[in-house]
Amino acid sequence: MKKFSIDGKTVEIDDQKTYLDFYIRDGEPALVSIDLVGMLMGMEEGNVPVDDGLREYMEYLERWATDAPRKRFYRGLRAEGVTVLSGEYFFDGEGGEKIIDNLENTGRFAEYFLQELYRK
């Protein structure tokens, strides 16, 4: 765990976890790594502003706290042979569960971050 002091508050992050985001751009799936530790370092040093833009970005990432478990559920159904009409097939291949876990890491951290800095 790493600790950072941001706006007079201590924020902790598990620097051993992987944090990802997934989206569709021009009809193509995009899976990207997010350097949340670097972002927190930038905030602590004053190089990344703690503002409404950051809050909105974290709210966007927070969706993975609910979307990742849903994707895991649909992946499990398809593995059992159930036909599922959704766009969740991006996570069916080898390593799909790990990707979903890493997306959920992102959502859980975003929830925590928003609670610590914006919602108290």
Image (tube, rainbow, N blue to C red):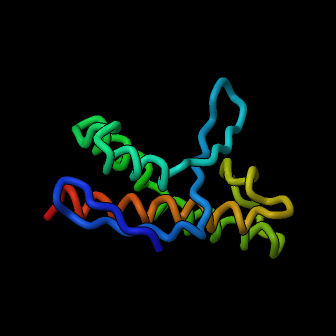
Residue displayed at 63% across by 71% down: 73
Residue displayed at 68% across by 38% down: 30
Determine which quarter of the picture holds residue 47.
Answer: top left
Q: Residue lying furthest left in this view?
A: 120
Residue displayed at 83% across by 70% down: 81
Determine which quarter of the picture holds residue 113.
Answer: bottom left
Where residue 6 sits in the image (x, y, percent)? 25, 55
In the picture, the quarter occupied by the C terminus is bottom left
Determine whether 90 is above or below 66 in the image: above
Q: Residue lying furthest top in this view?
A: 26
Where residue 77 sits in the image (x, y, percent)? 72, 71
Q: 50 or 112: which is nearer to us? A: 50
Q: 96 or 79: which is nearer to us? A: 96
In the rendered structure, the answer to whether residue 102 lies left or right of residue 92 reads left
Where residue 60 sits in the image (x, y, percent)? 40, 45
In the rendered structure, the answer to whether residue 59 lies left or right of residue 26 reads left
Count of marks placed on residues: 0
Where residue 27 sits in the image (x, y, percent)? 69, 28
Residue displayed at 23% across by 38% down: 52
In the rendered structure, the answer to whether residue 43 lies left or right of residue 89 reads left
Determine which quarter of the picture holds residue 31.
Answer: top right
Determine whether 21 is above or below 69 in the image: above
